[in-house]
Amino acid sequence: MAQLYPFTDPRVAETEAPRSMARGDNVRVTDTEGNTFLDAVSGLWCASLGFNHPRLIRAAEAQMQKLAYYHSFMGRTCEVTDRLAKRLAARLPGDLSHVFFAASGSEAVETAVKIVRYYQNARGKHGKKRIIAREGGYHGSGQMAAALTGMSYCHDGFDVPLDMVVRVGRPHYLRDAHPGENELDFSKRMARELDETIRREGPDTIGAFIGEPAMGSGGVILPPEGYWQGVQEVLARHDILLIADEIITGFGRTGNWFGCETWGIEPDLMTIAKQLTAAYFPMSAVAMTSRVQDVIADAAHGMGTFGHGVTYGGHPVGAAVALETLDIYEEMDLPAHVNALGARIGRALGPIGEMPGVLQTRRAGMLAAAEMETEADAIAVMAAAERRGVFFRRIGPVVAISPPYTVTKDDIDTLMGVLAASVEEAATLATTA
């Protein structure tokens, strides 16, 4: 085994080799043994335009012919990268108007945390550095990004800086609500608990709160009524920045261009990646408001430079691919397109939600899930679906659905039919076990 595979048991991989993919055709991938699968989760939530879109391939090739690489350090930049920055600034929601480029979602989160520290230092708030993150949140696998992630398998054995993180609860109404508590009351309790945590830890020690508008890798948890309004009111009260992690939800996934628009979130910083280039080139960015940018710029001017960057940040090929991706999104009228296809997913989810073993189905745009009663149920569903030629993603007891935007109506009917048949098979196995 020459490769140490991510999020895989290395010893298991020595005897059970991972499935090796050889080629893609729109929403389908084929392995080296000739087996073809409809990928219903866009790889890792990211291949929003399928696996071999000709326009993105041409955009990358054309930019490689023109300028295959250059950086944005020390008074130089790339024309195509500046065009992308302006395009994003015009598209981003709220007051977000400046971007800093990196190469991955984890790098974007690491950068956002460094910006928070820089910002608080520039304001003379030298102790205001810790970050609030939620149980079940996923923010990457860097040092601080892994610490922010609320999953122990990202911490175990790595000595990540957990002392810089203040952990609060996840907004999972289905599993975590008190008996008789409606969604609004649950959200109000979450806001009270957040406020109490901040007061206990000390507001002057906390620089920012990070959260995904809808939690992806934590189990496709959609925020209950009133949740984000309550969180934002608490953060404003204590002068704490809000980082919206839109690495999964950004660029249409929830039925709007950004999840912040879906749930009325007004962040100070935003991390974006994945669907920015439809996964055809590793690229990410941190967006920030003018209020944050101005403080950063003044402080950096006093020091003579802004001393942060990554070699491949703002890569010209990535920028060219991102610009073409945005063109395609705009041509398809992204929110309308996602909502139309999402409604088809939703119509199929309804009956699945009434099937044995299913606790709940839920959806926002083309981000959906079937939460099974137990993790064993979800494992059985996944195995049955793979035998039928469809990849879903299992997150504990949750079966996640997040297909590329290039799925056809027939593709949706196929993947949802497979899900229904797989749930039925799992229920039959459970009753005969």
Image (cartoon, rainbow, N blue to C red):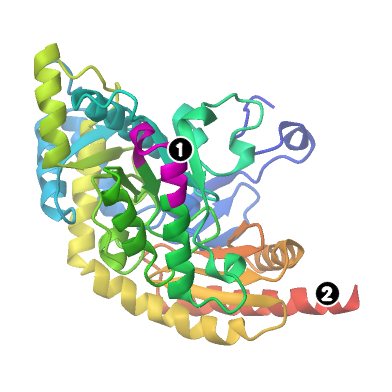
Q: Residues within 10 Å of mark 1 (few under 14, many from 20)?
A: few
Q: Nearer the viewer, residue 245 or 209?
A: 209
Q: Amino acid at mark 1?
A: Glu
Q: Which residue is mark 2?
A: 429
**Three-letter residue code for mark 2:** Leu
Nearer-the-camera pick, 362 or 418: 362
> Can see residue 23?
yes
Q: Earlier in the sequence, mark 1 or mark 2?
A: 1
Q: Specify the segment rendered in magenta.
A: 196-208
Q: Marks 1 and 2, Cα distance to the nearest angstrom?
A: 49 Å
- Residue 13 in the image: x percent, y percent? 73, 36
The correct choice, above or below, for 150 with respect to 413 in the image is above
Main SS of residues in magenta: helix
Using the rendered image of the protein, determine whether residue 223 is visible from the camera's viewpoint. Answer: no
Mark 1 = which residue? 201
Judging depth in this view, the residue of 186 and 344 nearest the camera is 186
Q: Relative to the observer, which residue lies in front, 371 or 333?
A: 371
Q: Residue at x 22, y 34 (%)?
A: 100
Helix, strand or loop status at disc 2? helix
Which percent across, then down, holds residue 300? Answer: 14, 19
Q: Residues within 10 Å of mark 2 (few under 14, many from 20)?
A: few
- Is disc 1 placed on a helix, strand or loop? helix
For this view, does 395 lie left or right of residue 240?
Answer: right
Residue 357's disc number: none
Q: Judge left or right: residue 26 versus residue 77.
A: right
Counting every numbered tag in the picture gives 2
